[in-house]
Image (tube, rainbow, N blue to C red):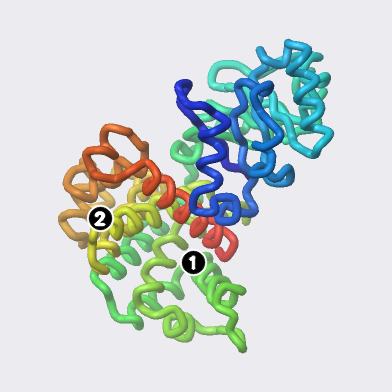
Amino acid sequence: MALAFELTPADDAIQASLSLLASADALAALAPLDCILPLPHPLLLEASHLESLPPHRVILRVPASACIELPVQKKCKALADMGYRIMVDGVAAAAATQAGARALLFNCAEALPPLLALVSLPGPHLASGVDTEQRQAECRAAGFSWFMGGHAQHPQPDASSNDGTSRKRLLALLGLLARDADSRELEILLKQDPALAYHLLKLVNSAAFALSSPIHSFGQAINVLGRRQLQRWLQLLLYARQQDDGSANALLPLAAVRAAQMELLCKLGGGDRDQQDMAFVAGVFSLLDVLLGMPMTDVVSALSLDLDVVMALLDRAGPLGRMLQLVERADPAALAEAGVSHEAYWQTQVQAHHWAIQVSRNL
């Protein structure tokens, strides 16, 4: 897996990338993810820039049109010899090989690249514009192994995981969490859901908690986590439990990032502990309609949520709604209106991704 940086055409890509990686100790926080950095003008990359770009963590993304130029080929080949991985953005035919490229980035929204463009490079190849699970499957079959787009938010209907009984049980559990139900009530419902129970016990016995002896019962698990952490982890575990084949659900890291960044932005704005908790809930619940395959109005109507959270989930309205919009898509004007600097927003993104990485490791 990797994190692809997207910069506006007006940005100085090299300086912008260096500034982003230097702030908040981003590379360390994002480990073990590689960072894919745009390099529209490879000839402008100087030796001094490389001091902040460790080869084992950085993939340099070069436009296919630039690779046609012989000086660029030589520059990229020299970088490849130093250990940097070169990813060509678009089809560059033989020029990609001459530039020492290892991978291809291609916008697969409307068409797939020629087969030769993929097999001539070792990869891993990145498909962008992948907005449905069906398109992801087609790209995977073509030879791509990394995907970028909205496919996680447009899953194919799965009757086995979204049957009425399963959804009813999930909504019941969410309702108990929303009203801060007694631990015994939670334990009874957990016993009815083997997948969720398995993930909960796996979590508390993970290295994250470093317990001296293993936990075998739900009551022990609840006591180890504590009420506040139990609620948070169960909200995220709802996403983990959906995969019956053992593979990771792509919604899980997305929900974790949203929840963590919502909490951080709320704290940045002076919100107290309860307000931060509500911001976290709004973030993690913002994908429940996708998870459960049902309208958000139906999800919200089954839960006892704070009005501010309801407004955020249904209409992206109110303080939490505006914050959720920022998390979903950072708009410079909206950031300015919210009084959040670009640097502060980036720091919340890095911290949120760091937490999501830890969550994905432990669930």
Q: How many marks?
A: 2
| Relative image position of residue 265 (x, y in whole percent) | 32, 53
Mark 1 residue type: Leu
| Residue denoted by label 1 | 196
Q: Is residue 214 left or right of residue 20?
A: right
Would residue 185 appear left or right of 87 to someone viewing this image?
A: left
Q: Nearer the viewer, residue 230 or 264?
A: 264
Please name the residue shown 23% across and 61% down the image. Answer: 271
Viewer can see residue 154: yes
Residue at the disc numbered 2: 269
Quadrant of residue 85 within the rendered picture = top right
Q: Residues within 10 Å of mark 1 (few under 14, many from 20)?
A: many
Q: Measured from the top left, where is residue 289 in percent x and y?
A: 35, 46
Point out the image quarter for the C terminus.
bottom right
On screen, residue 252 above or below 326: below
The Cα atoms of the two marked residues, 1 and 2, are separated by 34 Å
The residue located at (58%, 22%) in the rendering is 107
Decide which of 6, 301 is in the foreground and name it. Answer: 6
Q: Is residue 245 visible?
A: no
Q: Which mark is residue 62?
A: none
Q: Looking at numbered disc 2 in the image, what kind of residue is underneath it? A: Gly
To which quarter of the image does residue 337 belong? top left
